Amino acid sequence: MASLNAVKQWDQQYDLVIAGFGLASMCAAIEAHDLDPSLSILILEKANEAETGGNSRVAGQSLLITKNAKVLAEYQRKMSEANPIPEDMLVPWSEAMEALEPWIQERAAQAGAQFIHGTGFSERDAVLEFPEFGAREAVHCTATILPIPSGVYLAFRENIRLRPRIQIAFESPIKDLVQDPDTLEVFGVIAEQNGQPIAIRANKGVVMATGGFEANLDMQRNYFGLANPAPLGTPHNTGDGIKILQKAGADLWHMRNQGQSGGIWPGFKPEGFVNGFLRNFFWQSFSWIEVDANTERFYNETAELQLTHYKEKKHGHWVDTPHYRAQPVHMIFDAITCQYNKLVVEVMSWNPVVRGYKWSDDNAVEIEKGWIQKADTLEELALKISRDPAKLRAAVDRYNAACTAKQDADFGRNPDTLFPIAQGPFYGVRVDPVIVCTGGGARRNIKSEVLDHEGQPIPRLYEAGEMGSMFSDLYQNGSYLTEAMISGRAAGREIVGLKHWEGGA
């Protein structure tokens, strides 16, 4: 840690300093400002202004709305059975969820945005991930703020703009916390601006809201065992805040949840890209399969796994789909699927939403780029994607026979999706594991206080959002953004109630 004695003078001074500029950060700032408009608030953001927003900017924008806190708590309790959430956190969280909708509506109205019930991009009124655990009773509906994509993020970004005392410093990553080495009390931060360290005093406290470690390949390999995943969200989530909190004496939790709770999804990461593209899940035709390292089918490809964040039930338990264990994986398809299906969905990933990449409707541009291989025969295609031609032919022939029989004896694929791969030319594209988000970080309580290894709060240190999320196993759609709101608001509220630190230079 940076000891208080090592800070000879403070370069800047604020009442509240927040690290990160995603939804949780904005909610902490809004709550603190609205409770005490006299507070001086600084948000430190690692990225440049064009690439701010964290994962909240490209998430599905779904918000879970509940009308029954007791039932929601029981639903979440069942989803978290493998790694129980502390009851003194779970119960007040569910109560906060029941009370949250009017506050979201206020934020949308203040931004001049439209709050609606529904996902905004499908006909579903609610996404119910695990019905057997009580999803229908717990989830009143799914809601969002228009436009799609990024409506929730944009509305809260406008709320920040309307509060000019909240200042934002872009390209100013936090590097350390200034602490008492004996008590761990936090007095400020060391940040970096223009390549130089600066000491910023936080009179009331610091909120860490820097997101997860999706884009840190070393952390992905060592904490979760993923060999080569790609982030769908911000490339700036590299686990910096987690390492700072480790150094500050925080206990860690939820670093190795199943699929990091948000799931490991199928996507495409072309050479030279940090981020992956999310593979489409709204299909117009179904003449396609996936093959694993053995050039064999390995799961039910057209199951609506997006509705369970890519968990499937095996041996009586919900577990991650096998994509990341089956690598290398290729999607094999014919001319009909290529012509009528854009291979990616463009509302929930960084490359199209922030970087502005427009995937061609018929995939022709990506074929020309060499991201998708094309061949007149399956045998020729096999060689282009480094597969055994006989094995690929056998896999396709077996699948086509299932199409003729209208019964998939291997994986139970819906007969309505059994379309043969028969119309050349034929195509193959590597399917990469892509990460929605990670939920691990510092252990915290319902007040968003960061806890040390003895379970005691580290004074004046708070955490909000995806980093250190309470979700410990299975995940219900719409819960991450609402948890960011609840944890951010809790941190802002708690800091308002603290006395100013009076010591130091």
Image: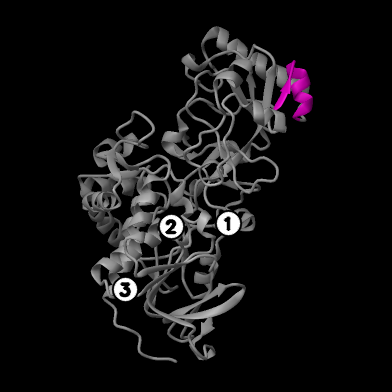
- What residue is disc 3 on? 495
- What residue is disc 2 on? 22
Residue located at (47% from left, 27% from top) = 282
Placement of the C terminus among the 4 image quadrants: bottom left
Q: Earlier in the sequence, mark 3 or mark 2?
A: 2
Q: Nearer the viewer, mark 3 or mark 1?
A: 3
Q: Residues within 10 Å of mark 2 (few under 14, many from 20)?
A: many
Picture layout, residue 281 above or below residue 53:
above
Kindly tell me whether residue 446 is visible in this rendering. no
Real-space Cα distance between discs 3 and 1?
32 Å
Q: Which residues are magenta?
A: 373-385
Residue 102 screen position, x and y as percent: 21, 50
Residue located at (53% from left, 26% from top) = 300
Residue located at (53% from left, 23% from top) = 411
The number of numbered discs placed on residues in the rendered structure image is 3
Q: Earlier in the sequence, mark 3 or mark 1?
A: 1
Q: Which mark is residue 391?
A: none
Q: Earlier in the sequence, mark 2 or mark 1?
A: 2
